[in-house]
Amino acid sequence: MSIDERIVADLVANRIEFVTTVPCKQLGGVIERIEACPDIHHVPANKEDEGMGLCAGAFMAGKRPMIIMQNTALGVTINTLVTLTQFYRMPLPMLISYRGELGEPVACQVEMAVHTKALLAQLHIPTYHFHKQDDVAELDKILKHTFMCNKPVAILTDASFWGGY
Amino acid sequence: MNRSDVLRAIAPVISDQLVVCNIGLPSQELHMIDDQPTNFYMLGTMGLASSIGLGLALGQKEKVIAIDGDGSVLTNFGTLPTIANNEADNFILLIIDNGSYGSTGDQPTYAGKKTSLAAVARACGCETVVEVAAEDTAEALKTALAGDRMTIIVCKCDSGNIKVPVITMDPVVIRDRFMREVARRNAG
């Protein structure tokens, strides 16, 4: 089973039925699988805060939502995470490609990478970090944890997790 | 008619519908005029009423009315292509377009100048878009509710605000009350 297939299988097993995405090169494979998955309603968003709004609505509709995005977009989502997701106590797993880590070829990506964990810590968002493919074994528990505690939860995924740059 | 006059006029039409209401004065006014468990009041997060409304409409079968403003649609313009391309025929977006940022003191928006939100929505691919005068909004909403097509209503009204108390209800109470109502209606 590929890493993309494994992730989608975990989403389906955890009854995640509504996924919004903003693409990243590393996320291309998993987004393709989600689009093809009959158990998941995939809604591509134009911007990550918009996606979080869609997820809030889907959650209130009774669906378990998820957002897939790149860490560079964390800045544009802070107000939404705080005043919508956290203020109204809504669960939101965030599968985030962590650009700007070891092996990164684009210098500008490092500029946001150095702030990513600090921002998540400042927001008191539980954060998990996948470095290698075996780390995916934790995904199932992280998803259960997210819907147990009704919080946004970040899963940072390095390029090495997806198979390199 | 200003926004609060429009909300008073449409209150009987939307009273028993699922409503996602925009941040600031629109939510405060709707809360004062006709508080209902079917109302989801946004206490923050400028711009996302239409996104929350669309997510809600896509996730269950009951009709959903998102009450938005011209300023907040301008803040989240990306919502219009998403609405157009993820059509939910149980979704109605009502944009109360008073040409100003009402909650912050009626500073003018571009929608009150050269920019037509109805034309933008059509250009984004939204197929059923109507622009109406303030006094015709209730009728336009009735028509949209009677049909089964995703509809965007742009209501052109005057700017201006009334004195209205802030909402002191806890956000989790607002959300829980609303979700129970959504679940109850979908179970029926």
Image (spheres, coloured by chain):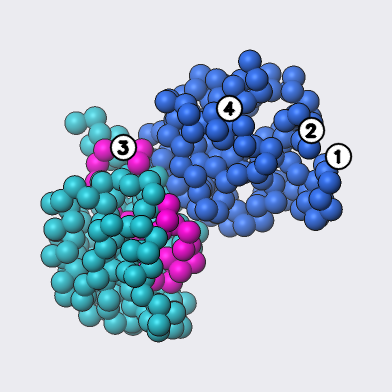
Residue under label 2:
A164
Q: State which chain disc 1 sits on.
A: A
Viewer-nearest of labels 3 and 2? 2
Amino acid on which disc 3 is placed: Gln
Q: Is residue B75 left or right of residue A155?
A: left
Quarter of the image where the C terminus of chain B is located: top left
**Colour seen for chain A:** blue
Residue under label 3:
B60
Q: State which chain disc 4 sits on.
A: A
Front one among B42 and A14: A14
Q: For the residues marked 4 and 3, what is the alpha-carbon distance in whole angstroms?
A: 22 Å
Quarter of the image where the N terminus of chain B is located: bottom left
Q: State which chain disc 3 sits on.
A: B
Residue under label 4:
A143
Amino acid on which disc 1 is placed: Gly
Residue under label 1:
A103
Q: State which chain disc 2 sits on.
A: A
Question: Is B75 within the magenta?
Answer: yes
Image coords of residue B137 (percent x, y):
19, 68
Q: For the residues marked 4 and 1, what is the alpha-carbon distance in whole angstroms?
A: 28 Å
Sequence-wise, the earlier of marks 4 and 1 is: 1
- Do dots 4 and 1 share one subunit? yes
